[in-house]
Image (tube, coloured by chain):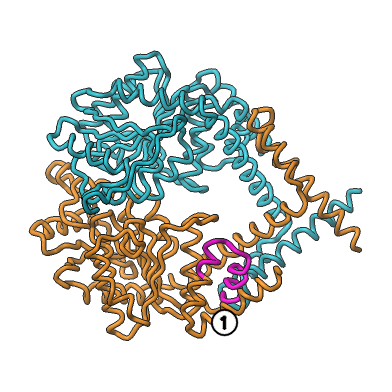
Chain colours: A cyan, B orange
Amino acid sequence: MNQRRNLDGARLAQEARQGNRRALARLLSLVENGAPAGLIALSELFPYTGQAHIIGITGSPGAGKSSLLNRLAHAFRQSGTRVAIVAVDPTSPFSGGALLGDRLRMRTLINDDGIFIRSMASRGHPGGIARATHDAVMLLDAVGYPVILVETVGAGQAQVDVARVAHTVVLVEAPGMGDDIQALKAGLMEIADIIVVNKADRPDARQTMRMLQSVRHGGPSGHHGPGGDAPAPPADADAWEVPILLTSALEERGIAELQAAILAHRQYLSASGQWAARLAQHARAEVELWLRRHFEALQTAHLPPERWESAVDAVAARQAAPAAVAQNLLEELLASICHRRRGEC
Amino acid sequence: MNQRRNLDGARLAQEARQGNRRALARLLSLVENGAPAGLIALSELFPYTGQAHIIGITGSPGAGKSSLLNRLAHAFRQSGTRVAIVAVDPTSPFSGGALLGDRLRMRTLINDDGIFIRSMASRGHPGGIARATHDAVMLLDAVGYPVILVETVGAGQAQVDVARVAHTVVLVEAPGMGDDIQALKAGLMEIADIIVVNKADRPDARQTMRMLQSVRHGGPSGHHGPGGDAPAPPADADAWEVPILLTSALEERGIAELQAAILAHRQYLSASGQWAARLAQHARAEVELWLRRHFEALQTAHLPPERWESAVDAVAARQAAPAAVAQNLLEELLASICHRRRGEC
């Protein structure tokens, strides 16, 4: 039975590679649910990964990420590029959290065979949404989508997560953010490779753009006395200067410029050696993850559930410290493993 | 040398328990940096944890979290309760990301010996900010702060994280959130135990409160046709009804009510058995974490760095899948461990 399911994973992987959308959708569900067949398929498909340009689109709800992503996907399609969209933001119309107008605007995307849309928001993810998103992106990469757009909700940890999965992070802001400038200064801007002020049709868009430009160059100077501005850091020839762009998804303005900036960032990553460095970093994280998974399988095989329960109970009752309890469990685990190995000799 | 540092951890733990604030601050730094002495101290202090009521204060930048937290800390102090504050939000004045006015308002807190303030935002955290925050809260719990306020930035994953460390999550909103209602509907409200509309001095505060109330009871009905509203779920006698409160940190209004709601939620957790369930859940997570840490120490001891490098290189070059590479590493690790154990017999 298990054997059959595992074969299923390998077969689905092959079919998805051949362009079967239903096989891909089924595979994504298996992977997101942490099913063994999904893990097998991920492993089968791993050699084909590392090709896609993964682009994170992030920003606060209301900044217009979905409409912009819609336009951007169209722009890539018009250049003949196949595009996958992964929506992690629960408020995204791509996740079904849509207003009617948004859904209508999406219809052209949905009827295009060169576009694949996957929503992560409303499903249960045993390993966490970050892990599920990572695995989904790996699959879409392996089956040959050269561009993967990941839409995620902005602010804080969520943005740091998109920085981990994406090569290029596009931060979308609406005009008139006010207090958000503080947040931007404090770290969110650090992970943005491209900043977009969307809704450029609004009168205060240019002002927001200017404010962002001043933040990029060392913070708004208003709080310093005259002459008290910190000098701008010296320009590094190899460094990426984060562009700040004006777009209007509504009026279809600035989309080509955004696409060009994304492609320029992709080239910068290759030329600077960062693309290769990321591949190595990602490889290390994957090996560590699988080592952990294999070790957990050993735990399940060698430690009976009652043993776990009594250990947890002792800790919950504060009768023992978790470090000591874990040391004992590990000792029992290793004794059992070595005993079995000796028996096999 | 290592021995001495470990003794240091135990000594600092003892001094911190006796109320030595400098020892506590030093210990927090050790723990946040993942230093061995910090881990020893955490382990020493574990039996004393599980007492504090951990309260997460979360919400978007600009909602007025810091001022509200300031008032709330004062209210607890006036009831004679010692309070620890952990600021995870990088824009918080407690983290140094402050405007001058905020800092002045904080001064009374800083001069109070019954209050301990710790900022997590600007330090390096090798195990991640979530882990560092968890460990800091554990320490503050163990040294006897009965109330720990954790201030964190709102939206998305960050809020889910605060739900993991806190018993009671207070979601702070400012009037006129607009699009955020979508985000709230989609999941953020699920983790809030108490919702606060701050800045009640503003004229649109009541409208925001009404909107939140309608979201709490199954979403704003405006999008359905007449009679198309989903019926409200039946009230469960044992369930916690999330209160929606109006506060004004500026005018010191609603603070006592917020404190009362927090204390009521604490009582609800005990009475419903959820407090005990959380202790068990937390104990399990701690044992798993330490098992992982011990296992990682074994990896370091038994697998030479060159072996790791070649494994990672093979995966980065897509010559081997991470699952297979990890399986080989684990096999070598276990062979080495069992070989050494056999030698000791």
Mark 1, secondary structure of its residue = helix
Asked if one can make out residue A1 in the rendered structure from this viewpoint, the answer is: no
Location of residue B2 (image quadrant): bottom right
Between A290 and A192, the one nearer to me in the picture? A192
Would you say residue A66 sits in the magenta stretch?
Answer: no
Where is residue A204 drawn, in percent x and y? 14, 37
| Residue drawn where x is 21% and y is 73% of the image | B255
Work out whether residue A92 can be spotted.
yes
- Residue name at image x 79 percent, y 50 percent: B334
What secondary structure prevails in the magenta region? helix
In front of the other: A313 or B297: B297
Q: Nearer the viewer, residue A82 or B212?
A: A82
Figure quadrant of residue A6 = top right
| Residue at image point 31% right, 67% down | B240
Q: Which residues are magenta?
A: B28-46
Q: Residue most toward the left?
A: B203
Q: Which residue is mark 1?
A: B14
Between residue B263 and residue A302, name the one nearer to us: B263
Q: Residue B166: x percent and y percent? A: 41, 66
Q: Amino acid at mark 1?
A: Gln
Q: Quadrant of residue A303?
A: bottom right
Image quarter where the N terminus of chain B lies is bottom right
Tell me what residue is drawn at x 56 percent, y 74 percent.
Answer: B46
Going by the image, does B336 lie left or right of A122? right
B77 sits to left or right of B312? left
Q: Give x and y (percent) for residue B82.
A: 37, 81
Near mark 1 (Cα within 10 A), the count class, few <14, some 14-19 or many ≥20, is some
Residue B97 image point, x, y percent: 32, 58
